[in-house]
Image (cartoon, grey):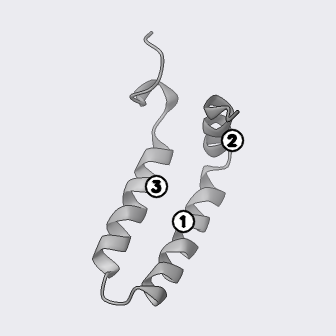
Amino acid sequence: MVNFGEIKRKLDANEDKVEKGLDKLGDAAKKKFAGHDSQIDQGIDRAKDAIGEKNSERRDAPPA
């Protein structure tokens, strides 16, 4: 079974590496799906924003 808490901790601990990977993913997607650059950029930006949120700000965080 997937432990989402552990995944979130690893994402937070390696935020810079994940963002670099998202940039590479975006570049590859732009090559494959030419003409959809703005949509791809928007998706990558949203993913980066979600990763950058602090645990206390996440919607699925337990109440304080």
Say which residue appears at 37% left-offset and 55% top-offset. Answer: 46
Q: Amino acid at mark 2?
A: Lys
Question: Depth check: 54 or 46 in front?
Answer: 46
Q: To which quarter of the image does residue 19 belong?
A: bottom right
Q: Secondary structure at mark 3?
A: helix
Tell me, for residue 10, which label it has, or none: 2
The outermost residue toward the top is 64
| Residue on which disc 1 sits | 22
Image quarter (top left, top right, bottom left or bottom right) of the C terminus:
top left
Say which residue appears at 51% left-offset and 29% top-offset. Answer: 55
Is the C-beta separation of discs 1 and 3 under 8 Å? yes
Tell me, for residue 48, which label it has, or none: 3
On the image, the x and y values in percent for residue 28 come to 53, 82
Q: Amino acid at mark 3?
A: Lys
Give the CA separation, mark 1 to mark 3: 8 Å
Tell me, for residue 51, which label it has, or none: none
Question: Depth check: 49 or 8 in front?
Answer: 8
On the image, the x and y values in percent for residue 54 come to 49, 33
Give the CA separation, mark 3 to mark 2: 14 Å
On the image, the x and y values in percent for residue 5 come to 63, 29
